[in-house]
Image (cartoon, coloured by chain):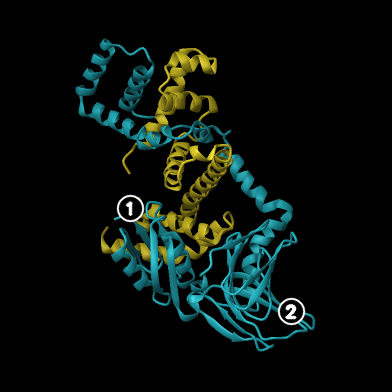
Chain colours: A yellow, B cyan
Amino acid sequence: MPASNTNKLGFFFSDHHRWLLQHVRRHLSNRADAEDTAAETFCQLLSARVDPESIEQPRAYLSTIARRLIFDRHRRRRLEQAYLERLMLLPEELAPSPEDTHLLLEALHAIDRTLSGLPLIVKKAFLMSQLDGLSYAEIGRRLNVCQRTVGRYMTQALRECYLSGAQP
Amino acid sequence: MSRRALDPVAEEAIAWMVRLRSGHDDAKQQAHFQTWLSQSPANAAAWEQLQRGLGRHYEVARRAPGVLRDTLLQPEAGRRDVLRGMVGLGLLGGGLWLGGRSESGRTLLADLRTGTGERRNLSLRDGSRLMLNADSAVDCDFSAERRLLRLYRGALVVQVAADPGRPFIVRSDQGDIRALGTRFLVEQLAGSTRVVVLEHAVRTSLPTGETRDLTEGQAVMLYPQRIEPLPSGQAYRADWIDGRLSIIDESLATLIDALRPYRSGFIRVSPQVRDLRVQGVFPLDDSDRTLAALAETLPIRVKHYGPWLTLIEAP
């Protein structure tokens, strides 16, 4: 990124960072979480290589990004909670090690985000194929739908996967 | 929710994947697929993107026990529900919302507070000494019956002057720490309070009635429902008094959280490096130097965008 652009971003941050932090803190009470989210919002601006001068409504722009990040954070928290609840059901020798837990949560979060908004039955069908390698006939039997429907569910889920596979 | 339309090549790649996965795969179909794939670079690129979208995360998830994988099948809280839930949280009897809001109001009005990068060393009316870490806030409520310090944010070390008639109490969000003639550290964290006894003893207590006495060198964490002992040897937690940050085998994220009160801009630690283990003694008042030192010893890259944003990421 050219130096002048970095400078412009510097001004942009200094103009808006206080407002953005306050805005985020209305939704995230934890200070470190809020700071992290505010910083991440600016990061998205950086990685999108947006010229700050081209943004006509900076606050609306920033709050749109922040809203998505806050939503993502809540989604992740819900997932982690569900994970921990289930972890307690597992005998200790089956529970993943702390390092594996970290990796696994990252992976689950990424998958969860990709599939977010899809109907539950679509997710089920897709995960049975993707994780367990079941045939459509078997998936159809388990979900009580015909194979053609399973194919349609797969198409829906794979579209989301395709989008998530876009190069950063 | 409206979905973005994909370009035709992407739809073709997806249709192939749907067919190949069906379980009815045969040699003829395979041959057709190979023809399609080699027909044009666009086809190959679309196939590659789809493969990436089905990549390593699924390999990790595949190895996990089924119960844990099932977390992906929680009923979906729609975006609207989540946002409504967030508003709901905010409006809960007005209490939480106001609580959250007045927190900043309260800390602005708190009797004693320190700003970013500022430590204070104060004498209280009774002769006790109070040391406040940066970005901390305390109310001082002394009466004929008791001496109460309400810690809202940050960390303090107090050296209590003896006064048998008036107990000395530090109150955090989680509970009370009552001096039994002494010097100790109280640190308000998110959802918990750390207490480290530097000299003599204290009595910690929760609103639930649970209490625990600590002697010199002992430390606990107060949670809303329980008091948890910490390993001994935590005295280094008070090193900020001398402008030092001592870290013994903690995550990079924890170290950065300790630096936040000393920097006015944002610091963002990317998830890839958040859990790197760190140890050492770092200067608090020159956090740029600390970050530079970290960049030399850890596999990280520190990028500054003006004074407002610092990114710490994998190299």
**Mark nearer the viewer, 2 or 1:** 2
At a point 46% along the width and 47% down the height, the residue shown is A98
At a point 63% along the width and 44% down the height, the residue shown is B84
Residue B68: x percent and y percent?
51, 36
- Residue A50 appears anywhere in the view: no
At a point 47% along the width and 58% down the height, the residue shown is A36
- Classed neighbour count for the residue bearing mark 1: other residues with Cα under 10 Å, few (<14), some (14–19), many (≥20): few
Which of B204 and A48 lies nearest the eye of the viewer? B204
Q: CA distance from mark 2 to mark 1?
A: 59 Å
Badge number at residue A49: 1
Which of B211 and B108 lies nearest the eye of the viewer? B211
Which of B184 and A46 lies nearest the eye of the viewer? B184
State whether residue A128 is above or below residue A101: above
**SS at mark 2?**
loop
Badge number at residue B167: 2
Q: Amino acid at mark 2?
A: Pro
> From the image, which quarter does the C terminus of chain A lie in?
top left
Chain letter behind tag 2:
B
Badge number at residue B172: none
Residue B239: x percent and y percent?
48, 76
Quarter-of-image position of residue B110: bottom right
